[in-house]
Image: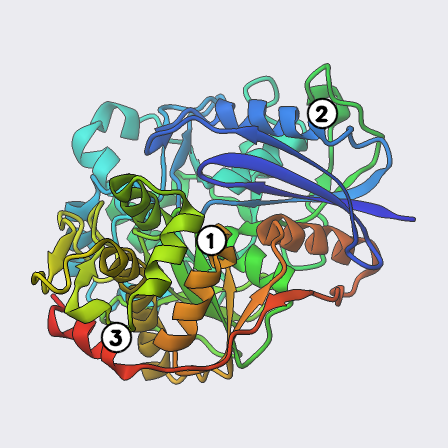
Amino acid sequence: MTLVAGIDSSTQSCKIVIVDAATGALVRTGRASHPTGTEVDPNAWWVALNEAITEAGGLDDVSAISVGGQQHGMVVLDAAGRVIRPALLWNDTRSAAAADALSAEFPDLAERTGSKPVASFTSTKLRWLRDVEPENAALVAAVCLPHDWLTWRLRGFGPENPALSELTTDRSDASGTGYFNSVTNEYDLDVLSAALGRDASAITLPRIVAPGESAGTVAVSTLAASVTASAAISVACGAGDNAGAALGLGARAGDVVVSIGTSGTVFAVTEIQVPDATGTVAGFADASGIFLPLVATMNAARVLDSTATLLGVTHDELGILALEAAPGASGLVLQPYFEGERTPNLPDATATLFGMTLASTTRPSLARAAIEGLLCGLADGLDALGRQGVSAERILLIGGAAQNPAVSTIASQVFAVPVVVPEPAEYVALGAAAQAAWVLDGTRPDWAIATVAEPTSDFHPVIREQYARYAV
């Protein structure tokens, strides 16, 4: 049996799966936590990766590996390969004003890069660095993303071996920077120069590695002493988290993935890029060589966390309560912008509860309003994809919250297309593992994905209609 490894270095933790390259069958796993917050020292990711590999039993029998990671995070390096300041993560909204400034300076950004910038994008964080920390901006010799930096470290580079020219990435993650054109596969140096405030031709950017192409091999000597690994482990190109999940799910045309994690995302695999000048749809690239139009929300599973805590119940109990209320929650509507919002672009917004009456203000109605509000925000994302010509034949509902029967049941009432809940799995890590297998034999693997629920379609227009009444 040939084994490959896939890594998901997410906001909250690092997960690794080691699978059979032929079938995708899981052999063993490992996990380690990341620090909380919206800025993190990248070395914490490296420590967590080594811990996760150790927990997974090492890499002695692994032939190839790939890293999937949270998109957009700004990792800036000086000429000696040292991290200049903690990485600003995708969910750090302090660069919202910088996003507005770049949009004003480049009205054609959606055509140039596939997306209108929002606070999540790397370009906006670089503009923030220029404006707020000019002394750090002046030190920048290279810019990369979380998965790029970890791939570079796995291959033996870093302050001890600062070969900035060895930085690599893939189209999917590069397409979320705000200064990359995934149609031409070239960086837009004019945008990068404007973001950082100096000539970008002197800045090192990661080389784009194609799907199925090797970026190099693991440098065993740079891994922690606790990690065992064989020589000549191939390293694949890696991917941004959403592109990795699409690859892990085997998503094809007609599939729309709705992911409920720390953030909420709605994305589809398409043959052509669908740039949206309004900024609602991000025209990202996927991990297979084509495109991944995507809508993201900042408020997802934590909406349910907050509501469950307020009601003093577990997540399972929250679901039971929600199903006691009728669709529409007797008119109660939760607009769930607890931490601002990315789509719509309202970084300073707060959550609001509408439609409170003596009849609607009950525990079951509040539980249902939380789930409906979360899903309606994602359904708005599906509508936005539809306006860009993306057709949906089924919804693949993933993420921890998708396993709650109430969430999948209510999803079948919110979405007007069939909903399928795949078996719980680390799909970003599985997508990275698929990239690793791709490197070994030169073809994209086609692994079977099991499903755990296919709720009967039961569309209730009243849910969306009520939510739309209070739209910002």
Residue drawn at (12%, 74%) of the image:
469
Earlier residue among tags 1 and 3: 1
Where does the image place residue 263, in percent across and percent down from the top left? 37, 51
In the structure shown, which secondary structural element does the residue marked by tag 3 occupy? helix
Say which amino acid is labelled 1.
Ala
Q: Position of residue 227 (x, y in %)?
A: 74, 22
Closer to the camera, 461 or 150?
461
* Image position of 351 with respect to 216: above or below: below
Is any atom of residue 117 visible in this view? no
Tell me the CA gap for discs 3 and 2.
47 Å
Q: Is residue 329 left or right of residue 267?
A: left
The residue wearing badge 2 is: 54
- The image shows a total of numbered marks equal to 3
Residue depth check, mark 2 versus mark 1: number of the one nearer the observer: 2
Q: Label 2 sits on what residue type? A: Thr
Q: Nearer the viewer, mark 1 or mark 3?
A: 3
| Coordinates of residue 68 in the picture (x, y in percent) | 57, 47
As measured in the structure, the alpha-carbon distance from the residue carrying label 1 to the one carrying label 3 is 37 Å
Would you call the spot at circle 1 few (<14 residues within 10 Å), some (14-19), or many (20 or more)?
Answer: many
Which residue is pictured at 71% across the width and 25% down the height? 54
Q: Is residue 344 left or right of residue 111?
A: left
Q: Which residue is mark 1?
A: 174
Label 2 sits on a secondary structure element that is helix
